[in-house]
């Protein structure tokens, strides 16, 4: 009786939540993200990242996979003890001992903020080669696990692994049974990152049309970036009705990584007119969050990484520098403050023009004339001058070194050391 009422209340709350014009951001940096080869995080580092995610305003954090090992489990325990705000979830196989362990690790979290994400492979490859189970057994195993998890958890998510390579009809059946068994959210996973935006949107629409109890559950999507389409796919699914996007900071994760949440968030923020759904994450927290994850994982994103790469607000090209000095928006997608980054960097290099050199020289406060500008420009472009004729140039170059392109800064460093030695 009590559980029937409880279920009705939960379904009501969930339906209200689904009506809000919001895309919920679920972060899996600390679980799928750290599955990236070469990345190891200690529990204390995980707590720092989880706290930063909470401060940024993510809806939920996938804290780890307790059954994967003692250090992993300890990470979940420490986050559970210290981090408040987002829903904290642990990953679990559809194995009862895993569920007990997840419940133990998340024990300090209040019942309405702790969740479990259950997964089992549903594609023919996973059924035949990994689980060696027939379709009916997969459904039965999933439903028994969901039912058991209700002993410990109010919030249960169910994500079939390799959903994108699962027969759609079977996938719909799995979702239907999972929701009936008690899952409050279901996940569509593109585990190997093979879908395109049109196909992603199509399957998300079909899930909503074919899963009869879909109104009683949130629909989340989880993309990998093997074709470089994870962000586009996630956004296509938002347009098609998905409620939750799960991804990682800096797009870290196995192979080509997971979808980068900073990319999804910025696309949603900048194109609110198109998506008509907001996010609870503060975009101004993104630069800090991304650099914290880069620092603690030791994985620095590529300089040209979308949204947060080092080069996004840096330019070396003369025409762009000219434009930016006239008005910063001329060659920027959005001002760096939008994501809490900046300032814009005008790099001095072989492609720079007079205006950037003049700008940086003026900022030194030294006595500078146009002849000096030409000499510095000549140096940047590899045109030698006779140092004896212009002894003051060396001081200019030294003061400009922090703004120089990496190759020129290194060359100047070597020259200075040689002269000193
Ligand atoms: Mn994944």
Image (spheres, helix red, strand yellow):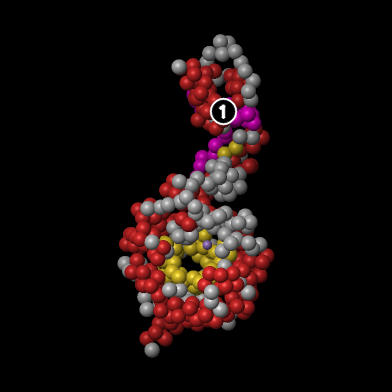
Residue at the spot 56% in from the left edge and 30% down from the top edge: 407
The answer to whether residue 32 is left or right of residue 348 is: left
x%, y% of residue 137? 52, 80
Q: Nearer the viewer, residue 402 or 334?
A: 402
Give the magenta range: 341-366
The answer to whether residue 332 is left or right of residue 72 is: right
x%, y% of residue 43? 36, 55
Q: Residues within 10 Å of mark 1 (few under 14, many from 20)?
A: some
Q: Is residue 163 visible?
A: no
x%, y% of residue 248? 50, 57
Q: The N terminus is located in which quarter? A: bottom left
Query: Is residue 205 rendered magenta in the image?
Result: no
The answer to whether residue 417 is left or right of residue 329 is: left
Q: Nearer the viewer, residue 92 or 316?
A: 92
Residue at the spot 44% in from the left edge and 83% down from the top edge: 8
Q: Residue furthest top?
A: 388
Residue matched to label 1: 408
Q: The C terminus is located in which quarter? A: top left
Residue 7's place in the image compared with 186, above or below, is below
Q: Is residue 165 visible?
A: yes
x%, y% of residue 344? 54, 39
Could you say which quadrant of the image residue 104 lies in? bottom left
Query: Is residue 364 rendered magenta in the image?
Result: yes
């Amino acid at each position: 009786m009590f559980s029937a009422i409880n279920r009705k209340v939960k379904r009501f709350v969930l339906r209200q939540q689904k009506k809000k014009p919001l895309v919920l951001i679920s972060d899996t940096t600390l679980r799928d993200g750290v599955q990236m080869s070469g990345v190891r995080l200690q529990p204390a580092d995980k707590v720092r990242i989880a706290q930063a995610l909470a401060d940024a305003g993510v809806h939920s954090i996938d804290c780890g996979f307790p059954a994967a090992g003692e250090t992993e489990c300890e990470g979940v325990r420490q986050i559970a003890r210290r981090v408040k705000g987002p829903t904290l979830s642990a990953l679990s196989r559809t194995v009862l001992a895993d569920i007990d362990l997840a419940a133990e690790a998340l024990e300090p979290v209040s019942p309405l903020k702790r969740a479990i994400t259950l997964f089992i492979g549903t594609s023919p490859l996973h059924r035949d080669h990994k689980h060696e189970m027939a379709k009916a057994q997969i459904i039965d195993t999933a439903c028994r696990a969901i039912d058991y998890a209700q002993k410990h958890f109010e919030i249960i998510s169910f994500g079939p692994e390799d959903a994108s390579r699962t027969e759609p009809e079977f996938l719909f059946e799995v979702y239907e049974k999972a929701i009936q068994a008690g899952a409050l959210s279901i996940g569509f996973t593109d585990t190997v990152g093979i879908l395109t935006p049109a196909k992603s949107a199509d399957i998300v629409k079909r899930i909503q049309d074919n899963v009869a109890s879909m109104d009683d559950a949130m629909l989340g999507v989880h993309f990998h970036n093997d074709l470089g389409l994870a962000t586009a796919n996630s956004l296509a699914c938002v347009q098609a009705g998905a409620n939750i996007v799960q991804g990682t900071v800096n797009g870290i994760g196995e192979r080509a990584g997971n979808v980068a949440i900073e990319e999804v968030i910025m696309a949603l923020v900048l194109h609110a007119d198109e998506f008509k759904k907001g996010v609870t994450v503060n975009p101004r927290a993104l630069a800090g969050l991304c650099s914290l994850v880069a620092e603690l994982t030791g994985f620095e994103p590529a300089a040209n990484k979308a949204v947060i790469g080092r080069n996004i607000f840096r330019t070396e090209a003369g025409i762009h520098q000219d434009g930016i000095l006239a008005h910063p928006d001329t060659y920027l997608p959005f001002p760096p403050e939008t994501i809490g980054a900046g300032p814009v960097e005008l790099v001095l290099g072989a492609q720079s023009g007079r205006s950037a050199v003049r700008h940086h020289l003026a900022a030194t406060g030294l006595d500078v004339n146009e002849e000096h500008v030409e000499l510095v420009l000549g140096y940047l472009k590899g045109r030698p001058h006779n140092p004896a004729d212009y002894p003051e140039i060396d001081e200019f170059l030294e003061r400009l070194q922090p703004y120089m392109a990496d190759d020129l800064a290194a060359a100047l460093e070597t020259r200075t050391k040689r002269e000193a030695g």
